[in-house]
Amino acid sequence: MFQFNRLVGVAVLFAIAFAAAPVTALAQTSAPVEWKVSDGGNGHWYKLIVSGPISWNQANLECESLRGHLATINGPQEDDVVANVALQSEGWNFQRGYGPWLGGYQDTSANDYTEPKGGWKWVTGEPWQWAAWELPGYSEPNNCNCNCGPENFLHYKNATPYIPDRIWNDLNGSGLTNCPQPVSFIIEWSADCNGDGIVDYGQILSGALADANGNNVPDCCESQTWATVLEYVPNPAVVTDANLRAAIVATNLPWRVLDNGTNIEMLLIPGGIFTMGCSASSNYSCDSNENPTHQVTLSKAFY
Ligand SMILES: [Ca+2]
Ligand SMILES: [Ca+2]
Ligand SMILES: [Ca+2]
Ligand SMILES: [Ca+2]
């Protein structure tokens, strides 16, 4: 049985300060889509955000403020997922057949940079291992369209007027005279800040993880002003009771932290009913002040 009198520490009421973060209000958004692991996917979430005319750099910043990134495409299956999100007509500027921005850009200082096809990268740093440039009948990337070169940013364009499509096109990122900009972008959420193997964005959507300030970062991962997180999930070699481990994990708070003020390491005690006092073992006897054992109920987790 878990025994408080074996724990070193000062009981500090748990209080986590949430770092303020901007959350951008945008004109129109579609429902987010999960590429489910059970469907062979990566568990990431994708969403079309309709912003009105927007540069690639601004779209990139908007994604960062929403704690995601412009969508990255690592193969034909992910291209299918992202294209399905992109094929909503409200995300299109049909004046020139421009669909949403994606997370590819051309690094003109890269060793393999050549126009039009060299030096392409993803915003996340994932390797550029697959591209859908080579659709029959299309000459993209071409680094030039209506005198708008150089074209160093990736988006979807269409082939038939007024019909959304999924042709990869390189485009000027900021828009120039006579060259309207895309009016939307696709954000992808992939972060798993608490390391439980599930993308945090979906856990917030389902209510599995709290996000009190609505910034798409679970409360359990917000920076804590008073403590440094040492371990999120309890070590089974230390907390051998599976029920107790589950109760700790269910708080969505880190299990082991270092108090920044005192440098004292502290462990999380979840709410629940516990036995206080000593149980004698073959190695240790009980002190008189550790008896009698008795039950206590804790209504709140604390360190
Ligand atoms: Ca991706
Ligand atoms: Ca280019
Ligand atoms: Ca082009
Ligand atoms: Ca997670």
Image (cartoon, rainbow, N blue to C red):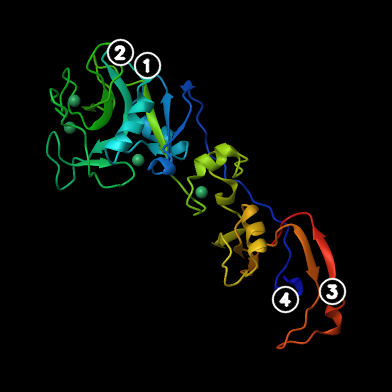
Q: Residues under labels 3 and 4: Cα distance?
A: 13 Å
The answer to whether 49 is drawn above or below residue 274 in the figure is above
Q: Residue at x 61, y 56 (%)?
A: 249
- Residue 84 location in percent, x, y? 36, 27
| Crowding at mark 3 (Cα within 10 Å: few <14, some 14-19, many 20+) | few
- Residue contact at pointers 2 and 3, CB within 8 angstroms: no
- Residue contact at pointers 3 and 4, CB within 8 angstroms: no
Front label number (1 vs 2): 1
The disc, 3 or 4, on the residue closer to the chain's N-terminal end is 4
- Residue contact at pointers 1 and 2, CB within 8 angstroms: yes
Q: Residues under labels 1 and 2: Cα distance?
A: 9 Å
For mark 3, give the secondary structure: loop
Q: Which mark is residue 6?
A: 4
- Residue 255 location in percent, x, y? 61, 61
| Mark 1, residue position | 89
Q: Which mark is residue 94?
A: 2
- Left or right: where does residue 10 sit relative to residue 141? right
Q: Residue at x 72, y 68 (%)?
A: 10
Q: Amino acid at mark 3?
A: Thr
Q: Residues under labels 1 and 3: Cα distance?
A: 68 Å
Q: Which mark is residue 293?
A: 3
Q: Quadrant of the N terminus?
A: bottom right
